[in-house]
Image (cartoon, grey):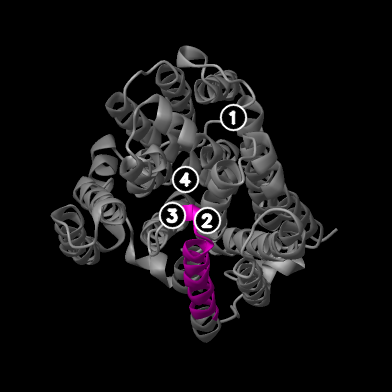
Amino acid sequence: MFIDILGYSAFFVLTESISRDLHVLYEQSSWVITSYSVTFAAFLLFWGRVSDLYSATTVFIGGFTGLGLLSLIISFLKDKYSFFVLRALAGIAGSALIPSSYRLITCVFEPQELTLAFTVYGLSGAVSNMLGTIIAGVLMINHGHGQLAAWRWFFRLLTVMILPCSVTSYWLIPRYPGSEAGDQRVAKWRRLDLVGALTMCAAIVLIILGLTLGASYGWRKPGFLVPFLLSWPLFIGFFVWEHYLGDQALLPSKTWRIPNFKPLIAFALGIYAWWGINFLPLTEYFITVADESAILAAARTLPQGIIALFVTILLGAVPVLVSRPRWTIAAGLLLGATGYVLMAQPHNYVGKDYWRWLFPAFIIGSGGNAACFSAANVAVMVSSPPEMAGVTGAVLQVSLQVGAAVAFAVQAGLLTLHPGGVSNVDNIHASFYFQIGWLLLTLIGFLATYRPSKGPASDPEAAVVVA
């Protein structure tokens, strides 16, 4: 979680530098982020299934090591095409970490400890969200070029952080067998459901590819229409195939019978999007329009990370707030929408208007979104049977990643609504109004569909740690 979100937030500062050094065209610049996220989202379900059937420890260590080595190689690349390909491979390696870590947490901790464990797990995300932009901003102080460019040192820093941890993980993390340790290897191979895995991978890749190309080149172009339209038959075919396989499927039908799983997954589409929709244009505005340094731009967004960290610590100290997620999530969505209402008011994002509008918006909105993230994370994982933790954690992450990709694609189109790009605040306002509408619709839908669990076996409240 820490490494995933660290890279996610740092790229809001580093994208412009990477695009310039590798000669990435403006309309292709979204691929600096998307080349990783598209394969990351596409392979989550596959790695979740592997983690549940085989050893999650092996999946975790293998993915961690692969990500560290690929990060080192990426730091030396000189052209955009090799960068995009290697980042896509890094996304596959990185996607192995999330479902395997969910699975390992459910194995290591007792049921009554899971609420606190997953809250602390979410805390690592809040910390890395805060540190990502700051680390990137500090590295950007270095005005080196070529192999000394700041973004290259960021990838090398990732390598230094990842490889020692992956090596020590080999000895520190216990070996937990999969949920069917007694089965023959052939039976497990069949239960991997490679047909379903490949179908879902292709569907996710195509829909994100279509949305990204549509935002870059136009919504009437074949680059958007062909992959976007092809993705839907694949999605439908995936669910038909999964229904046919029943409990042998990559995504067993019983997954959807987990209490409130469907409304929580639908709601999670907007969580990563909340931070991304304001980080990306505001950081670019601070650097290119206000002519501020990258470190100052990072410092301006720092209140979002600090309040997210504070809220996550508070939820860990008062676990009842996440064990009853309905009202915590509803309040968080309302606060998130309020934050965007404030962000959509100023016509200048620096000077007095920053303190009048943006600072309180960051505190109110990011605090609410952090509460949503922790509550959803805990609610999904505590309600999930341990033998399904890898798959349910993967579905949650797919929702988070796909929601962010959709939001970025829509925002990219809205930022060109009027001439001037991010220098025209009307474009930024339009993308913020989109986010307000999304949040309010999500709030209404969540309250209408969420049903408090009654049985103690599936009620997240049953897992609250009693001091």
Q: Amino acid at mark 1?
A: Ile
Q: Which residue is mark 1?
A: 173
Residue named by callout 3? 421
3 and 2 marks in contact (CB < 8 Å)? no
| Residue at the spot of label 2 | 272
Label annotation for residue 99: 4
Left or right position of 371 against 211: right
Q: Measuring 78% from the left and 53% from the top, which residue is drawn there? A: 310
Identified at 27% across, 28% down, the residue is 81
Q: Is label 3 or label 4 in front?
A: 3
Asked if residue 427 is among those painted magenta in the image, a careful observer would answer: yes
Q: Are marks 3 and 4 in contact (CB under 8 Å)?
A: no
Task: Give the magenta part as a residue range.
Answer: 422-443
Q: How many angstroms separate mark 2 from mark 4 (CA)?
A: 17 Å
Q: Which mark is residue 155?
A: none
Q: Is residue 221 above or below residue 59?
A: below
Q: Main secondary structure of the magenta part?
A: helix
CA gap between label 3 and label 2 equals 23 Å
Pointer 3 and pointer 1: residues touching (CB < 8 Å)?
Answer: no
Label 4 and label 1: CA atoms lie apart by 15 Å
Q: Are marks 2 and 4 in contact (CB under 8 Å)?
A: no
**The magenta stretch spans residue 169:** no
Label 2 to label 1: alpha-carbon separation? 29 Å
Which quarter of the picture shows residue 92?
A: top left
* Of residues 34 and 452, the one drawn nearer to the viewer in this rendering: 34
Is any part of residue 385 visible from this angle?
no
